[in-house]
Image (cartoon, grey):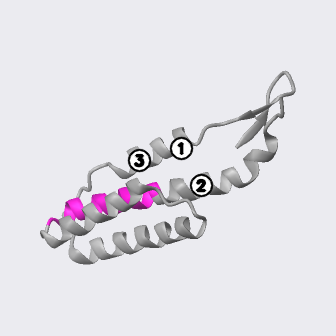
Amino acid sequence: MTLIGPNGKVMRLSNIPLALLLLIASSTPLLAAGSEADFRTAYAAAETANQEAGRLRNQWTTTAAALAEAKKAAEAGDFDRAIAASKQAEALAKASIFQANNEKEAWKALEIR
């Protein structure tokens, strides 16, 4: 995201605060025990977001790690942990999508020196 500063120069806001906000929001514990169906829903949403990031050529390795952790936890029958990891993976994928979309146009605002 870019803004015009008080001196008339273009300022670019960092994507990192948004990504951190998404990570914090997704890491809050669930109030109720999760089921396998809840896991499958959360995992599918994370996979869909990660595939979109792939289409934009901006998949993050941390997203893949979170998806692997979710699958491992589900195989062990720990659906609460699997759901939490799936939600974290979805948040990471969405943050990478945001970054890719933002960077498509942000480079134009750079000042040549």
Marks 1 and 2, the one that precedes in the sequence: 1
Query: How far apart are the alpha carbons under marks 2 and 3?
Result: 14 Å
Task: Locate residue 24 relative to residue 96 in the image: left or right.
Answer: left
Q: Position of residue 113 (x, y in %)?
A: 83, 29
Q: Position of residue 78 (x, y in %)?
A: 15, 65
The stretch in magenta equals 78-92
At 58% from the left and 64% from the top, the residue drawn is 57
Location of mark 2 (residue): 98
Instruction: Find out whether residue 16 is within the magenta segment.
Output: no
Residue 18 marker: 1
Q: Name which residue type carries label 3.
A: Leu
Q: Position of residue 80 (x, y in %)?
A: 21, 62
The residue at the far front in this view is 113
Marks 1 and 3, the one that precedes in the sequence: 1
Instruction: Find out whether residue 83 is within the magenta segment.
Output: yes
One can see residue 32 in this view: no
Q: Element at badge 1? A: helix
One can see residue 83 in this view: yes
Q: Name which residue type carries label 2.
A: Phe
Few, some or many C-alpha atoms within 10 Å of disc 2 (few <14, some 14-19, many ≥20)? some
Location of mark 3 (residue): 23
At 46% from the left and 56% from the top, the residue drawn is 60
**CB atoms of marks 1 and 3 within 8 Å:** no
Q: Main secondary structure of the magenta part?
A: helix
Residue 71 marker: none
Q: Vertical placement of 14 versus 80: above or below?
A: above
Q: Position of residue 85 (x, y in %)?
A: 30, 59
